[in-house]
Image (cartoon, rainbow, N blue to C red):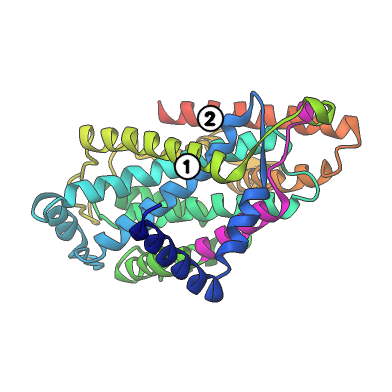
Amino acid sequence: MSIPTLKNLNIVQTVVDWLDERVPVKAAVEFAGHKEVPVHKHSIWYYMGGIAALFMGIQFATGFLLMFHYVPTFEGAYASVQAINMQVPFGWLIRSMHSWGANVFILVLFIHMFSTYFMKAYRAPREFTWLSGLGLVGIAMVFGFTGYMLPMDEIAYFATKVGVDVAGESPFIGPYLAEFVRGGSEIGQVTMNRFFTLHVIALPLAMMGLFGLHATLIQLQGISEPESIQKLPKAERKYEKFFPDFIKKDVFVWFAVFVGFMLLVTMRPFGLGPQVDPAAMAPIGIKPEWYFLSQFQALKLFPAKILFFDGVHVAMVFIGTVFGSLAVVPILDSTGKIPFISKFATVYGVIFLIGWLFLTIWGSL
């Protein structure tokens, strides 16, 4: 080996040693090297979490860039978004990445959530991992709701108005919640202030904190195996090293997904509708974003009165209970030792998924 090569090795080792004294780099690499990932026919679902993290990073990066040009005022927001689309170099690209990215991010989170559910990855000792994941899905949906209004075009404004009004129909706290979100009786500058503050400060902090907890729990507890794999003798199970084997595949998947995403963004740039006139009538057939369509459609199925109760109130309680069950049912099946509960959890998940897809598609028609 030549002297220059030895010198280069010494420099690298010196840098690594210096960094390791301050950050446990070697310990982290050693930990990752000992960690194993199960290999089986369902292994593809293990990549969903990494893809979700990729799009979370895209959202943070593009959102940060958009803040340099966006004007968070009731009068100036639309013009600033229009300028981003038409005047700022590559502004249309960054905005399209952010807008399309929000939709893809939530879609990937849904896929990750359902795949985790059906693989029974919520079972002990991973209950908190499951609950923190549900929290991330909830935060992402609130992210989408608060960000949808910010361009202040016609559809965004009236869809937000409908969404706030629907939330206001929740029993007991609904009217107070709607008034707090709006900052009064009507959507205006105060509403814009609150949505923008939530979107760029409160929600990112909440998501980063919960994502940190979620990722830490996954690293500490390892990746779960489906029931069918757990029943196999240990000699028949297959594993691969998390680092570098699984990480290399993960990076390749990120690259492939990112390329496909950029094709979508460049071929179908995210549009901007006409500027809103708050005094005008809402467009016919106004609907929320696709990830709220199932709830929106479900509300239409309830009559105005159910016995002595307001039908909308009953609908809101029903919808909240159904979505809340995603936290309760897995806890009941946390041990997996009661066959009836285990089968019930699976059947319930299938019914939930089919119902959600059916209402979402129905609501989009």
Residue furthest to the front:
2
Can residue 344 be seen? yes
62 shown above or below 335: below
Report the side of 123 relative to 95 (left or right): right
Q: Dot 2, crowdedness within 10 Å: few (<14), some or many (≥20)?
A: some
Residue interval drawn in magenta: 206-229
Q: Which residue is drawn at 32% across and 66% down?
A: 192
Principal secondary structure, stretch drawn in magenta: helix
Point out the tag, 1 or 2, that comes first from the N-terminus.
1
Amino acid type, mark 2: Leu
241 shown above or below 132: above
348 shown above or below 59: above
Alpha carbon distance from label 1 to label 2: 26 Å
Residue furthest to the left:
87
Is residue 210 a member of the stretch shown in magenta? yes
Q: Which residue is drawn at 65% across and 32% down?
A: 352
Report the side of 296 relative to 199 (left or right): right
Amino acid type, mark 1: Ile
Name the residue tied to disc 2.
359
Q: Dot 1, crowdedness within 10 Å: few (<14), some or many (≥20)?
A: many
The quadrant holding residue 227 is top right
Between label 1 and label 2, give the one nearer the viewer.
Answer: 1
Q: Quadrant of the C terminus?
A: top left
Residue furthest to the right:
338
User: Dot 1 lies on which element?
Assistant: helix
Name the residue tied to disc 1.
51
Q: Residue at x 42, y 63 (%)?
A: 12
Q: Which residue is drawn at 44% across and 35% down?
A: 253
Q: Provide residue 50's location: percent of width, then percent of height.
A: 51, 44
Quick one: 266 or 79, which is closer to the camera? 266
